[in-house]
Image (cartoon, grey):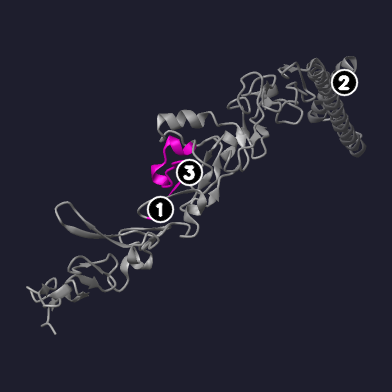
Amino acid sequence: DCVFGYRGNDCSIACVGVESNNICSNNGVCEEDGSCNCTAGYRGVNCQLECPGGHLNPCSGHGDESGGVQEGCLLSTSSGGVETVSCICKAGYRAADCSIECAGGADNICSGHGTCLADGSCVCDPLVVTSESTRTIDEYNGSGWRGSNCSIECGGGAESPCSGRGTCSYNGTCSCGEDGADLDTLPQSVFTYLIQLRGFRGDGCEIECKKSDVRGEPCNGDAGVCDAFGNCTCNRGRKGEACEIECNGGEDSPCTNRAENGVDCNEDGTCTCQIYYEGDACENVAPWLIAAVLGSFFTLLTVSVLVGRRIQEIRRKKRRRMRRARRKDMDGAAADVERLFPERRLPRTHQAIHVPRRKANAQDDKDKKKD
């Protein structure tokens, strides 16, 4: 038998690594021809190279042996004689050691609707960036599949995402150019594309908003808002299916704010005025109301005059009654004096009492003439 590290009939064949006392790097068996038969997970002339993933789990157990490459760990030698090892991964696995499984699973790579990249992420067919932060105009015109594994079908279907009238988001929902969307932050090319999408609604942008023949824009531009069913909710002062009719009196003051319902005009733009107004836009006060107001004024004036006269008459009568009562009291007092003192002449005070009596009679005559 040959000494350790040599082979052959005459023990003249030295094993690889015998000079350094490291035969086959202790990772293999020296054959009769002096070459190394490496153990699992090692490659190279001296079995000095460990397969990616480690010798205990070369190529992470996902190496492709279909081409005759053991464990999928391939030894390559450059023209300069430098040896390297690499893994040939099975379908659905990526990375140098085949440790990354493609999104969607090895048996359903990218759900059958995309390409698996080296990092295991998917690019949906056709090439569409699936990262929300790096979306481009190409994505808006791309396929109808979304999601990290291309498993989400866009609204409207994969063959016609968003019915060709909207943009499919990362989660598969359609943006049909809703009013008020923030487009200012988008690239100009995307902005121009999106602005053409306004006027559609529905999960797949299959519903078209009502448009007028006047401007050809949904809800006549800014005259109203299109709801989820394609119907227009018009602004105050606008009517019609597409808000194409302007109320008499204008948008700012429809029907001069004198409509019968207190809010707006009729569906055809005409006005039904409150009872006190008339005109196409209820801009005029009704003639009968003017006549009624003037009539009421003159009636009130006449009544005021008559009432004033009546009050004056009542006051005159009251004054006459008071004078008569005074005269009666004075006559009674004079009669009592004469009865008590018949032999005496009336004193000067008695005469003074009768002087105003004559004046009172004269005043009564004047009051009677006035009556």
Kindly identify which residue carries mark 2: 364
User: Considering the image in quadrants, where does the C terminus appear?
Assistant: top right
Q: Residue at x 47, y 28 (%)?
A: 192
Confirm or deny contact between disc 1 and disc 2 (CB under 8 A). no
Residue 227 to residue 83: above or below: above
Q: Residue at x 28, y 70 (%)?
A: 41
Kindly identify which residue carries mark 3: 125
> Viewer-nearest of labels 3 and 2?
3
Q: Residue at x 12, y 82 (%)?
A: 2
Q: Nearer the viewer, residue 18 or 225?
A: 18
Work out how far the residue at label 1 is from the one at label 2, CA to CA, in angstroms.
123 Å
Residues in magenta? 120-140
Q: Residue furthest left?
A: 19
The answer to whether 112 appears left or right of 95 in the picture is right
> Viewer-nearest of labels 1 and 2?
1
Secondary structure of the residue carrying numbered label 3: loop
Is residue 355 something that shows in the picture?
no
User: Considering the image in quadrants, where does the N terminus appear?
Assistant: bottom left
Is residue 177 within the magenta segment?
A: no
Asked which quadrant contains residue 32, the reply is bottom left
Instruction: Return the mark for residue 121.
Output: 1
Question: Which numbered disc flags the more N-terminal residue, 1 or 2?
Answer: 1
Residue 322 to residue 370: above or below: below
